[in-house]
Amino acid sequence: MRYYEMQMPANRFTAPLNDKLVLNAGYLEPCRLFPRAFIKTVINSYKNGYKKCTGDKQKMTEQDFTHFDESGRARMVNVGDKEITKRTAVAEGRVLLNPHTFELIKSGGMKKGDVLATAQIAGIMGAKRTPDLIPMCHPLFLSGIRLDLNLNEQDHSVEIRASVSCEGKTGVEMEALTAVSTAALTVYDMCKAVQRDMQITDIRLVQKTGGVHGDYTAD
């Protein structure tokens, strides 16, 4: 049995679903079909941990992927024993526009209406619906959601920032990221009749507080 690792041919992960990779009993091996997105997630998560394949099995620890059980099957993590603490998360992203689209947003000239206001509401709605979109997310009672959208004159972009908070047993990072993603997609939808080559980019978690893993601030 050959065990795969990080340094695999690029076309293995861009080809249709006829290349195989599975998380089985803690190892990566070619025995079951998975979507490309899953494969990329596994590879990206291990890009700093795998070395060139030597034929040895590269075993995972429980801390690597909490959303997989010991058999490699997906699961929702049991947070029942965790304490309720204050959780916060901040995420950011951008939508890159051409000068014409930028000016239409700025002047309120889009036929669909106020782009930034609509995207702001969409982002808030997206945060609240995160567990309906991301399979292993827990439904949370969110304390607050703030969406800020600003026009950047220098690079003709819409800058999006989402801040989410709750009192709960698990974090709100996914809610913040989903809020930014939904707002960005709404900007695209509102403007696609004018420009189709807009770029949604730089979506990332920039800060989180609370939880057993401690606080985090991006560089």
Image (cartoon, rainbow, N blue to C red):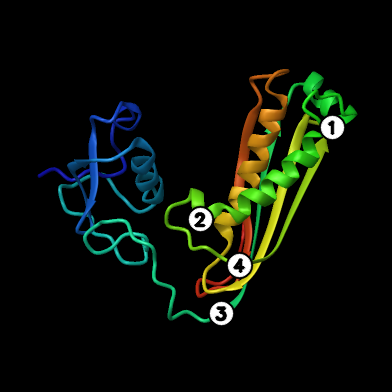
| Quadrant, the C terminus | bottom right
Amino acid type of disc 2? Pro
Q: The residue tagged with tag 2: helix, strand or loop?
A: helix
Specify which label sits upstream in the sequence, 3 or 2: 3
Give the distance between the C-alpha atoms of the residues marked 1 and 2, in whole angstroms.
35 Å
Would residue 113 be seen by someone viewing this image from the given angle? yes
Q: Are marks 3 and 1 in contact (CB under 8 Å)?
A: no
Disc 2 designates what residue? 131
Amino acid type of disc 4? Phe
Numbered mark located on residue 141 in the image? 4
* Residue 105 picture quarter: top right
The spot of residue 110 in percent (x, y) is 81, 24
Q: The residue tagged with tag 1: helix, strand or loop?
A: loop
Q: Nearer the viewer, residue 179 or 97?
A: 179
The spot of residue 180 in percent (x, y) is 65, 46
Specify which label sits upstream in the sequence, 1 or 4: 4
Disc 3 designates what residue? 84
Q: Is residue 193 left or right of residue 102?
A: left
Specify which label sits upstream in the sequence, 3 or 1: 3
